[in-house]
Image (cartoon, rainbow, N blue to C red):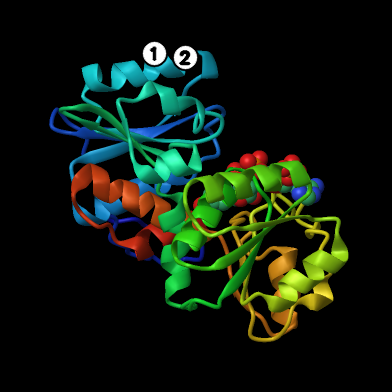
Amino acid sequence: MTVSSESDNRVDEVSVPIQVVNGATRVVGVFGYPIEHSRSPAMHNAAFRQLGLPYIYVPFSVHPDQLSTALFALQSLGVVGVNLTIPHKEAALGLVRHITREAAEVGAINTIHSTSDGLVGDNTDGFGFYAPLQSLWQPDSNSRAIILGAGGAARSVAFKLVSEGVHVTIANRSLDRAQKLADAIQQAGYRSVDAIALADRPAVAASIDSSELVVNSTRVGMYPEIGEIPEIPIDALRSGQMVYDLIYNPIQTRLLHEAESRGCRTLNGAKMLVYQGAAAFERWTGVWPPVDIMEEAVLKG
Ligand code: NAP
């Protein structure tokens, strides 16, 4: 296919692989409510096109009252699998035949795969979080990390880090929620995790100081509140520390900006989005996707 751009009297020719939809096309997608702003369709379809795979990824706007019906229909319709996003991740737990250890621990499903033995619910967020980090940071048995937040994303991050042997502190606005996550991790048989209130500045400063990794898994700084920054003692950040913000809109949050200006190494949430999607892609197709193409599609969005 040739695309012409004559706006500046030049004709650019770029090669765009075409996605053919026909009777042999296999369907995957995402259930969410709302779903209009999801970047997953662009990301997955770019990878299908690149590899010439006969798949299409479709956004499904599924009302919470209809989740059970929609999941039930997947196998009748021959849908290969779906991702789940807000508000379905927890609700789906009781609606599939099998769940993986990751989904059970985190208490949420983000990927469903239809098999001959029924629907399998999995959670690839922990993998998505850790895969891009691995090339930048290799923890040892003394490594410490502080996680800001105790919501759904923080659960995946916390379970992944403790399973890698990292000493974790969870700092959340609501101490009660942080403590519940710490208790769940201990009950699952991992080493104990500290829970502190985000408002406890001395405790947060001490934890940041002793940590090699600082993860923001709160919503603070996410579009449209892009001027916001988590209320932490920012001067506790030090050069060489790794600061990972799970937010991908915007790509460069104020936290990452402040961290960079203090000499920290930084990572934004775009690659996590790509790698959690890549793991789902592989479950559905048996093929590892071109993550660079997926990332390009996310960044274009
Ligand atoms: P969630 O379950 O709603 O949890 C939100 C968290 O943010 C809670 O810990 C909440 O604290 C905290 N929070 C919200 N407003 C706050 C404020 N004003 N001050 C301090 N803390 C505040 O959300 P989630 O699903 O975990 O998502 C969290 C972030 O991660 C979002 O920005 C999301 O975009 C990002 N994320 C990225 C990826 C990726 O692939 N890159 C994947 C998942 C999520 P309380 O418990 O006190 O309310």
* Image point (50%, 25%), residue name: 91
Give the SS element for disc 1: helix
Helix, strand or loop at disc 2?
A: helix
Q: Which residue is mark 2?
A: 66
Image point 53% across, 68% down: which residue? 166
The x and y percentages for residue 156 are 51, 50
Local packing at callout 2 (Cα closer than 10 Å; few below 14, some 14-19, many 20+) is few
Name above or below for residue 272 compared with residue 211. above
In the image, residue 188 above or below residue 129? above
Considering depth in this image, is 244 or 61 the residue closer to the camera? 244
Q: Of the residues shown, which amino acid type is indicated by label 1?
A: Thr
Image position, residue 279 (x, y; %): 33, 52
Which residue is at the front of the view, 220 or 18? Answer: 220
- Quarter where residue 253 is shown: bottom right
Q: Nearer the viewer, residue 2 or 180?
A: 180
Q: Is residue 119 visible?
A: yes
What residue is rendered at 56% in x and 76% in y? 143
**Tag 2–tag 1 contact (CB < 8 Å):** yes
Work out whether 280 lies above or below 87: below
**In the image: residue 134, left or right of residue 239:** left
Q: With 54 as the anchor, is 280 left or right in this view?
A: right
The residue beneath circle 1 is 69
Pick the residue in front: 6 or 40: 40
Q: Residues within 10 Å of mark 1 (few under 14, many from 20)?
A: few
State the image coordinates of residue 278 (x, y, percent, origin top left): 34, 54
Distance between the Cα atoms at labels 2 and 1?
Answer: 5 Å
Q: Which x, y percent locates residue 113?
A: 28, 35
- Does residue 18 appear anywhere in the picture? no
Disc 2 residue type? Gln
Please give the name of the residue rendered at 28% of the width and 61% of the height, measured from the top-left corner: 15
